[in-house]
Image (cartoon, coloured by chain):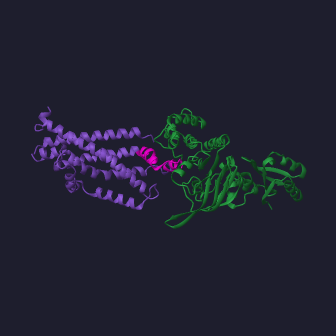
Chain colours: A green, B purple
Amino acid sequence: MIQLQNITKKYKTSNGELTAVKDVNLSIDKGEIYGIIGYSGAGKSTMIRLLNGLEKPTSGTVTVNNQEFSSIKGQKLRDARQKVSMIFQHFNLLWSRTVAENIAFPLEIAGVPKAKREARVKELITLVGLDGRAKAYPSQLSGGQKQRVGIARALANNPEVLLCDEATSALDPETTDAILDLLVDINERLGLTIVLITHEMHVIRKICHRVAVMEAGEIVERGEVLQVFQAPQADITKKFVSQITDTKETQETVAQIKANYPNGQLVKLIFVGEKTEQPVISHLVKQCDVEVSIVHGNISQTKNGAYGTLIVQIEGTESNVAAALSYLHTVEVQTEVIANAN
Amino acid sequence: MLTNFFPNVDWEKMWEATYETLYMTTISTVITFILGLVIGILLFLSSPNQLWANKLVNFLTGSIVNIFRSIPFIVLIILLIPFTKFLLGTIRGADAALPALIIGAAPFYARMVLISLREIDKGVIEAARSMGAKTSTIIWKVLIPESFPALISGLTVTAVALVGYTAMAGIIGAGGLGNLAFLDGFQRNRQDVTLMATILILIVVFIIQWIGDLITAKTDKR
């Protein structure tokens, strides 16, 4: 559905040339939810704008929905854009138009006759759950409702691809989840390909099938979300993964445990997929004759399965602890020794 | 009673002058609105990073606007006498004041249009582009509606300035309340005529401001 080949994008700034995207190759399948994560300035904003021709690459080709966006111009580009729509961090609604008029805007651009427009708008308002708000102005809506209008507007012309530019970054956590659920629903019901950029690992975890991690204009890591969670390679990816697993409180707890219980070993266990449902800990206690205390636990659902971490403290004789660790290896649970107390 | 306070006022003349002032102000405001909007949009779209980014067009338009905006109005009227004569065959009467009024006010209003358009969230224009909108669609359905309240409040300021300009135009014989105040009031030393003309000008200004504020408030949905 989407192909990026050897994409480089350079900007001329007053401080010289700036390379926003450096030799990126990327392929996204039809019906997939693909996440691109990176900190601000990583080039993800430019990346997503290459996909609908709002930015043109300095070199390389961008093919989306069988259209070469890197080279088409004029009417052809405008027509192609109607099938690759976009939602934004700050919604970018027309404040002078009501909800219904905002949603009708792309239909007006596409030249849809009035009667058809009205019917389609009604349909979309129901689809995004805004019944009864058709005549409201954006200023009368909450952030989540504004993004729903943005989504309805983006879906108006039955696009093949939906681009999400930090679509939930301006929303509170609860609203973020509701909007993400809506995106998944649309993806499943309409078979829409979704590409989203974000700096929140939570968003990737919750809805993406695959993810690419960007740093300084390059994709430093990519793959299935679960696999990236399980075995992050690049430092930046580890940082993003720890956004979800190691909260600040966890780190503080670990530090405290280390101080309070100098004996024993702190171990972080990482469970993936079905392993999360096995009684690993009780087996450990029974078989290896060690004391296990749980310090912190966390399970996250991703699109390809569950991902859990558990920090435990194992106490016992040296040989028993070693046996416990090797047992954990046999059940294919990843272990990471946090600190040896001695 | 009015005759006691304003013994020298010829009411028929006064109403005629009021009509002339309203005539000059209305026509010049309407044309200034259209012309200023066109120039303002051109200035906006040709500025860097906009849809028609073009340094030469931007520079030329900007220069013309700045030149005409900087010439004091009274000097502009005099400079435009040959042009007006060529255009209308006369330099007297309300119509003769129109070229100077419009050429004086349109660049001023164009600057206000530019300021209003710059206030529009860049993201909204980007959103329209991402939907496949043509530039003309962006002008009619995004730029103008989204900046409308600001365009109207700018026009109100311009219209009030135009009332002032008509008074100045009156001095060189364009008619209107300014002309009456100068010729009948000042030159014949009839203070009551000057005072009455002033009161009527104030009323005109207040009405313009009131209408402007009303439209601005009605159209502002932010």
| Residue B68 within the segment the image draws in magenta | no
Q: Is residue B135 visible?
A: yes
Q: How many marks?
A: 0
Decide which of B26, B151 is in the foreground and name it. B26
Give the residue drawn at x 31%, y 51%: B106
Residue B86 image position (x, y, % from top left): 20, 53
- The magenta span reads B125-147
Relative vertical location of residue A114 with respect to residue A69 in this rendering, above or below: above
Q: Residue furthest left?
A: B188
- Residue at the bottom extreme, as displayed: A16
In the depicted view, which residue is nearer to us: B185 or B177?
Answer: B177
Quadrant where the C terminus of chain A is found in the figure: bottom right
Left or right: A33 as drawn, with respect to A70: right
Q: Nearer the viewer, residue B155 or A107?
A: A107
Query: In the picture provided, is A132 more to the left or to the right than A244?
Result: left
Residue A119 in which image quadrant: top right
Image location (x, y in percent) of residue A65 = 62, 50
Q: Who's the residue at 16% across and 38% down the image? A: B14
Q: Is residue B129 magenta?
A: yes
Write down the quadrant of residue B184 in the picture. top left
Dominant secondary-structure state across the stretch colored magenta: helix
Residue A133 visible in the picture: no
Residue A263 x %, y %: 81, 57
Across and down, in percent, residue B144 comes to 41, 45
